[in-house]
Amino acid sequence: MAKRYFIKTFGCQMNINDSEKMAGLLEGMGYEKAKSPEEADVIIVNTCSVRAKPDNKAYSFIGNLKRIKKKRPETVVAVAGCVPQKERDQILRFGHVDLVFGTFNFVKLPKLLERVREEGKVVEILHSKIPEEERIPLIESPLENPYVAYVTVQRGCNRFCTYCIVPFTRGRERSVKPELVLEEVKRLAEKGVKEVHLLGQNVDFYSYGGTDLADLLYMVSEVPGIERVRFTTSHPAGFNEKIARAIKEIDKVCPYVHLPPQSGSNRILERMNRGYTREEYIEKVKMLKELVPEVALSGDFIVGFPGETEKDFEDTLSLVEECVFDQGFVFEYSPRPFTKAATFSDDVPKEVKNRRLTELQNLIKCQAEERNRERVGKVEEVLIEGFSPKGTELYGRTKDNKPVAVEGGEELIGKTVKVEITESSPFFLKGKPVFEEVKVGG
């Protein structure tokens, strides 16, 4: 009977992509995917540390694995990702954890598991110079979604925003060789993938041997079989007209940009060390929307950053009103270890953070609702990815990343179809096929 693995992933698309690669390594060793931790011979918890909430969730999940380890002592429990990269000793306090490794070590997973079998508890955290990305081999990975895949093109960050732990857990910026990106995209296309997401901590700072992100978008779009190309996450300081023009000129590049402002106050932006002003952010959004009128804009926001006054928060509200967002992710500030902001006095009361979070969320929700309402009666191209969680409708996304519940049967899965939008809400659309397929999947 084949051995089985279970991976629990917390956090961003980068972690999801890393987990897929770890799954590929395990399947290359002969492991099969388990339906639950209880059935697994190897359990990996891939952790996220960008905010306190996923951090705490990971610790809770790790703690709950103790009962499985007690029942099946031969099960290997591993903790990977950002949390052990910064809190190695705290992870080691869990006596039932056999393997601890950081964000730069997942390609060594097969050897690390061999060491666990031979040595017992193993800890492998790299803090020194990170190997060149081209030395990381392409890994045949199982995909959660057979039609949509992530491709990591840039890792790490040099920005050192005062609230952010990423430079400490993911290291300095380094980009993947374009030829390797294309090789992976071609492999995915051969497997039937229709849409690729180019990932980076700051993807618009991608740079390798004179090739920048806009150049890479042109190159990836030439891969046969790929119908859509997305990229995330952009940093406002790195976003430029060349990238915007690539979105305009390349039909396969989706008109969707995730461009996190974090705040609309110049005073807070400077305190955050974001590297741009509100005026510069607004000017870039205006440039983008002039070049690509159909573009959907999303962003991240932090409320209650140390020192944020009511005036600062009002500046954020006014930025949102001026730029108009299709989607927004709003978080209350929480201090992270090693960051400069952790030394600031967290002087915004919890109840004030809660109020500001709700007020900003409601503003963005109203904008999204109005934008979605305008689409009712229109026909959109939707890539059908599968059935919705309830299983009664199909699920897909428009080119500008709007989720759509679609009437129809499984014969539409994996195809890009024309869909008439019949209903809208702030967060998703509903529609029905107009019985004309735009492109036929594999």
Image (cartoon, rainbow, N blue to C red):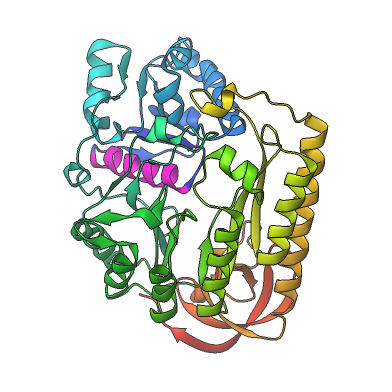
- From the viewer's side, name the closer residue of 269 and 44: 269
What's the residue at 32%, 55% (across, down)? 206
In the picture provided, is 295 more to the left or to the right than 149?
Answer: right
What is the tally of numbered marks visible in this picture?
Answer: 0
Side of 150 where 309 appears, left or right: right
- Whether residue 385 appears in this view of the structure is no
State the residue at coordinates (62%, 32%).
53
Please state the horizontal and vertical placement of residue 187, each as a whole percent of the image.
Answer: 25, 62
In the image, residue 22 above or below residue 72: below
Residue 418 appears in view: yes
**Towards the viewer: 257 or 398:** 257
Task: Quadrant for residue 224, please give it.
Answer: bottom left
- Figure quadrant of the N terminus: top left
Q: Quadrant of residue 84?
A: top left
Q: Which residue does the image show at 60% across and 60% down from the upper left?
A: 279
Quadrant for the C terminus in the image? bottom left
Position of residue 255 measured from the top left corner of the image (x, y, whole percent): 50, 72
Does 49 sit above or below residue 390? above
**Magenta residue check for 23:** yes
Residue 87 counted in the magenta span = no
Q: Position of residue 239 (x, y in %)?
A: 44, 61
Q: Position of residue 5 (x, y in %)?
A: 38, 34
Q: Which residues are magenta?
A: 13-28
Query: In the displayed structure, does residue 67 sit left or right of residue 186?
Result: right
Principal SS element in the magenta part?
helix
